[in-house]
Image (cartoon, coloured by chain):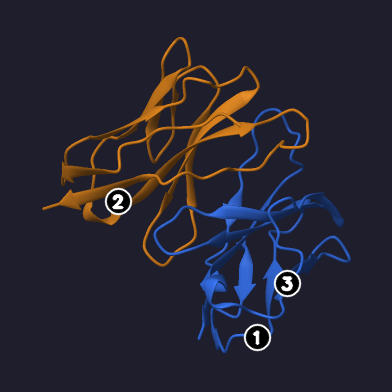
Chain colours: A blue, B orange
Amino acid sequence: EAGVAQSPRYKIIEKRQSVAFWCNPISGHATLYWYQQILGQGPKLLIQFQNNGVVDDSQLPKDRFSAERLKGVDSTLKIQPAKLEDSAVYLCASSLWATDVSGNTIYFGEGSWLTVV
Amino acid sequence: DAKTTQPTSMDCAEGRAANLPCNHSTISGNEYVYWYRQIHSQGPQYIIHGLKNNETNEMASLIITEDRKSSTLILPHATLRDTAVYYCIVRVMGGGTSYGKLTFGQGTILTVHP
């Protein structure tokens, strides 16, 4: 079974530039998550999708971050304009329908490493 | 979401059992205990989860106390490749605006040495 695919793996941009990250979840997974992980910290949820609808985006800095999942499969996370403090790993994850009470597993991709200079 | 408390770091000798504790004293009835680990430069990897019974799989065992206020992840025969950050997470299941998501803390840095 293919895992969660992310690209690009690494990106270096200057502050005030824009960047986009792409995620392809595991086939059949309705729930998709984007996490931000700053060096030395645990991942922090930015946004959660259920199919193509947003379930939780309370921690997404909406003045500069945006995310979409138009057809309920792939997703794109965009940052515009980037700030120095956006340097982090951006992790995409997916799972089956989140309300499965037996506890469904969330699978993570390898992450996209962003450095803003 | 219930908060978890873990030691910042632990050491373990290769071949010995690694016992990683986690406190989750405010856990609710609809919250599962999940364990993930993150090896350097990789995404978090699922290890095991449980509600109130002890669980075992090919990677580890999870022991949850009867009052569910704490748990222990056991790696029965640690290897050098088990060196990683281990996260204990309580996860809301069954409904509500916070259902399904994982809220990570700082985790425990486990170092397995020869």
Q: How many circles with numbers are drawn on the protein? A: 3
User: Where in the figure is residue A103, as x and y percent of width and height?
Assistant: 64, 33
Kind of element beneath mark 2: helix
In this view of the protein, can residue B66 be seen by the observer?
A: yes
Between A39 and A83, the residue placed more toward the observer is: A83
Q: Residue at x 66, y 88 (%)?
A: A17
User: Where in the figure is residue A109, as x and y percent of width and height?
Assistant: 57, 63
Judged by depth in the image, the label closer to the viewer, 3 or 2, is 3
| Distance Cα–Cα, label 1 vs label 2 | 39 Å
Kind of element beneath mark 1: loop
| Distance Cα–Cα, label 1 vs label 3 | 10 Å
Question: Which numbered circle lies on residue A64?
Answer: 3
The residue tagged 1 is A16
Q: Residue at x 69, y 81 (%)?
A: A81
Kind of element beneath mark 3: loop
Outermost residue, top side: B66
